[in-house]
Amino acid sequence: MEKKIIEIFRDYYSRFEFDSQYVEDLERREIAIWPFNSTTLIRHLSFSNFKDFKQFILKNVPMHVYNSVAKYQNPSIPNMESKSLIEAEVVFDIDIDHVNTSCKLEHDIWICKSCNKTGKGFVAECDNCGSLTIDKKSFVCNNCLDVAKDEVLKLIEDFLFSDFGLSKDDIKILFSGNRGYHVHIINKSFSSLDSRARNMLVDYVKGISARMYLKEMLKKKKFKFKGINSNGFFGRFAECIYDKINNRTYQDWEKFGLSSEKIEQIKKLKDVFLQELKQYDCDYSFLNVLGNYKERFIDECIREISVDIDERVTVDIHRLIRFPNSIHGKTGLKVVPIKYEDIYKFEPFRDALIFLKGEARISFKVKRNFPKIYMNDEEFDLNSVENKDIPLYLALYLYLGGYANIINFSI
Ligand SMILES: [Zn+2]
Ligand SMILES: [Zn+2]
């Protein structure tokens, strides 16, 4: 089966024209590939032009292709120091694996490696023994990818455009080919930032210090702070509080955990609170009405306004990232560069499909409950696709992801 798959990968690459609009200064980049049937990455490759690069890809047909976010004087020298860094794009990685989407209850299972407890949905640690070594059997559905896209839009519009003053020409957006998106800043003044400065960007975008600061403030009797008319992170924080106080119904607050007595109190004082939030210097001590729930309330707001990026990717200047338009070898989907104007209508399970011709039959390796999935604008109930002719792209998605075996396929 693998030989046939390598052939269709090769066929895709043979028709594809790689060019500099996707990876600028190719000759300055470290290139890496992950071959089929290999347990290691082949690193420290470099190519002086796209023609040689393409020839190499056609000869080796890898499962994954990467390029460095950095540009180097000597990209092919294995020693990182001797590579001589010129600059490195700042990259944000949004991966739905880290985010607790509601649909995970339906399609994710976890097994604790310490105590063998199993459960459904998303957990950071075992709820029985607290172990962090958890084997996750996850799946990515359309809803997961919608949530990832919302996070991308929040990152771009609230942080990169609004707070950092960047424009659409300063960014590159890519669908990662699997569980999320990569957003690159290609503005020169960002490319020279060192790891420490990148750490500060991560802190701001994830709201890490802000959360600690606000929790400290909450312990005080009176705490004045920015209201909804201010800019940036804390302006959005105030806005989030305003919206919740303004729009939450009795049932919403009840679900949140408040007693009826507290809910009545909020209802009575609502207009006073909203008025207070309109002040430039707002006194947040009204949050004391929430009693023990105020920390949770703040947490909720921070989670809504911050973006859950994978900090390791942003901080690592030498990071390797998926090559634009290459095939993600665990899904068969394309790593798609997306213009900012097109991100709203971008549908990964339609616009990142490569193998539109052909049909296949599969059998699942492990029986489990799968969600419905929409691919190429068609709905598939994965619980009833076994031994039926299904589109090749869907069969590859299930095979490369390790969920199923392909019995046969034809193009
Ligand atoms: Zn456990
Ligand atoms: Zn999902």
Image (cartoon, rainbow, N blue to C red):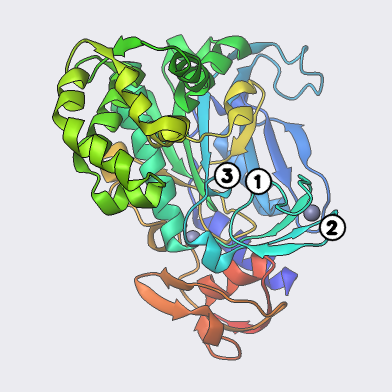
Question: Residue 154's spot in the image, x, y percent?
Answer: 35, 35
228 is higher (above) or lower (below) than 128? above
> Is residue 163 placed above or below 356 in the rendered structure?
above
Coordinates of residue 156 in the picture (x, y in percent): 35, 31
Q: Distance between the Cα atoms at labels 2 and 1?
A: 15 Å
Question: Amino acid under label 2?
Answer: Cys
**Which label number is shown at residue 98?**
3
**10 Å neighbourhood of mark 2: few (<14), some, or many (≥20)?**
few
N-terminal of the two: label 3 or label 2? Answer: 3
Give the CA distance from mark 3 to mark 2.
23 Å
Front disc: 1 or 3: 1
Pick the quarter of the image with the C terminus. bottom right
Q: Amino acid at mark 3?
A: His
Residue type pointed to by label 1: Ala
Q: Which residue is mark 2?
A: 115
Where does the N terminus fall, quadrant-wise? bottom right
Residue at the disc numbered 1: 124
